């Protein structure tokens, strides 16, 4: 990369940082926010505060200042996330919100939200934090714009919450917190209502999330666990469904496939694979107001033509191809979480506090979104583009390593 190209990049990044961090009240906060994002973009390997500080500045006190800015400085992350969402929406064609989990392994028991949990895809119990990213998704991008953290029961202890600086109003369940977060993002969105695609198979109460989204008027496509209890719709009851009460979703689908009483079995336009579908209701808590909602339960075949995951949507009249396309954002968002972990420091937060975690996750989101929407058009000639190899040059971070080194050289020769 030439020095001239590096300067152009720097000016572009400066404009992004000025726009994104304009709500921060102090000049030094805006400066350190920009430095932290640039460190995430330009530092190879593990993104420790010390390594990022060394990458972007030659100041001997920068590491301490960055650490204080992330962990102790009392700045609000909400306005920055809203600005990031607006900036990203202007440069993409968003189609939906996608909610995806992130498992963040931790050592010790003091970091906010840390607990021991069995992780299905790892096949073992892990000491970890569970985060949920909310992504602004188009047909080609999944850009993280907000985060929530799962706080299990053991984090209801008042003394423990005080040490981790968890605000007193953060008492809702993970599902309720995500519902409020989705509502908040929708208020700031300039592109109108969009459906919510969510993965509720591992760490969320699927029924609570679905009921909550429906009650708030959101369209939804939610991956659900096999044991989610559902009630057959009226057309299923007319076909003498063997269960009068709630039944596990996978059993309902399996029973109708076995007996041939499948409500609808069609092929999606894109892949020609068979999809089983039927209308269902969810058992409703008596405390939940409003009418009973009707949902479409459908299967998503795996790559070998066998029945794969189960999905529920309230868009019962939407073409199947559209629903399948929306469901596909789940895997794409999971891939983005992996890239955030490998190349953007998602797992590298060094503090223990609730505000510090949200500060870090917000700036990780800013780094990824900026890199994705400004650099990827120029990266196609780089060796390893599109590769899943951990040793291949990453198209989102490699240019910024060069930029950081160039700026350090410029300061030394000034």
Image (cartoon, rainbow, N blue to C red):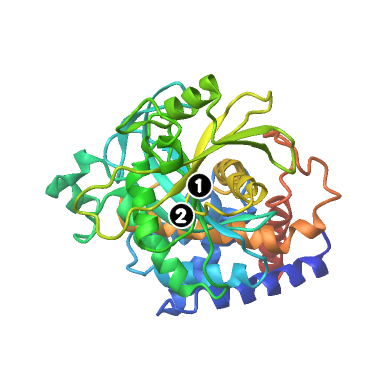
> Label 2: which residue?
361
- Classify 10 Å Cα crowding around label 1: few (below 14), some (14-19), many (20 and above): many
**Residue at the image point whose x is 81% and y is 58% from the top:** 378
Quadrant holding the C terminus: bottom right
Out of 152 and 393, give the one closest to the viewer: 152
**Residue at the image point whose x is 42% and y is 50% from the top:** 294
Please state the horizontal and vertical placement of residue 79, each as a whole percent of the image: 43, 73
Residue at far right of view: 381
Residue 179, placed above or below residue 334? below
Out of 42 and 284, give the one closest to the viewer: 284
Residue 359, placed above or below residue 312? below
Left-right relation of 308 to 209:
right
Which circle's residue, 2 or 1, is located before the other in the chain?
Answer: 1
Out of 31 and 394, give the one closest to the viewer: 394
Alpha carbon of mark 2 to alpha carbon of mark 1: how far?
A: 7 Å
**Residue 402 seen anywhere in this rendered image of the structure:** yes
Quadrant holding the N terminus: bottom right
> Label 1: which residue?
346
How many marks overall?
2
Residue at far left of view: 158
Left-right relation of 355 to 339:
left
Q: Tell me if label 2 and label 1 are in contact, CB under 8 Å.
A: yes
Residue 327 sits in which quadrant? Answer: top right
């Amino acid at each position: 990369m030439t020095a001239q190209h590096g300067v152009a990049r720097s000016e572009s990044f400066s404009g992004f940082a000025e726009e994104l961090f304009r709500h921060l009240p102090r000049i030094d906060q805006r400066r350190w926010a920009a430095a932290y994002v640039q460190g995430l973009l330009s530092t190879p390997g593990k993104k420790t505060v010390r390594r990022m500080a060394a990458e972007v500045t030659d100041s001997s006190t920068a590491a301490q200042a960055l650490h204080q800015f992330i962990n102790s400085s009392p700045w609000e992350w909400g306005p920055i996330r809203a600005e990031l969402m607006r900036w990203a929406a202007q440069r993409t064609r968003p189609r939906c919100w996608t909610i995806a989990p992130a498992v963040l392994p931790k050592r010790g028991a003091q970091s906010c939200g840390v607990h021991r949990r069995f992780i299905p895809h790892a096949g073992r119990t892990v000491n970890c934090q569970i985060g949920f990213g909310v992504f602004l998704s188009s047909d080609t991008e999944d850009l993280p714009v907000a985060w929530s953290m799962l706080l299990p029961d053991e984090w209801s202890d008042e003394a423990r919450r005080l040490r981790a600086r968890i605000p007193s109003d953060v008492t809702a369940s993970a599902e309720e917190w995500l519902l409020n977060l989705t509502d908040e993002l929708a208020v700031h969105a300039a592109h109108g209502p969009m459906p919510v695609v969510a993965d509720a198979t591992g760490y969320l109460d699927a029924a609570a999330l679905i009921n909550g989204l429906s009650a708030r008027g959101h369209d939804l496509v939610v991956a659900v666990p096999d044991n989610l209890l559902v009630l057959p719709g009226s057309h299923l009851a007319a076909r003498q469904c063997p269960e009068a009460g709630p039944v596990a979703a996978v059993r309902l689908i399996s029973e109708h496939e076995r007996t041939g009483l499948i409500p609808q079995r069609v092929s999606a336009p894109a892949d020609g694979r068979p999809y089983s579908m039927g209308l269902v209701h969810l058992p409703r808590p008596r405390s939940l107001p409003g009418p009973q909602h009707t949902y479409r339960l459908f299967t998503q075949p795996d790559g070998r033509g066998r029945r794969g995951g189960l999905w529920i949507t309230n868009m019962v009249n939407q073409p199947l191809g559209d629903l399948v396309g929306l469901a596909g954002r789940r895997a794409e968002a999971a891939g983005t979480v992996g890239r955030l972990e490998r190349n953007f420091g998602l797992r590298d937060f060094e503090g223990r506090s609730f505000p510090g975690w949200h500060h870090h996750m917000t700036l990780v989101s800013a780094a990824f979104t900026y890199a994705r929407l400004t650099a990827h058009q120029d990266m196609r000639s780089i060796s390893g583009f599109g590769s899943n190899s951990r040793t291949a040059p990453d198209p989102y971070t490699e240019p910024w390593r060069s930029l950081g080194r160039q700026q350090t050289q410029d300061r030394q020769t000034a």
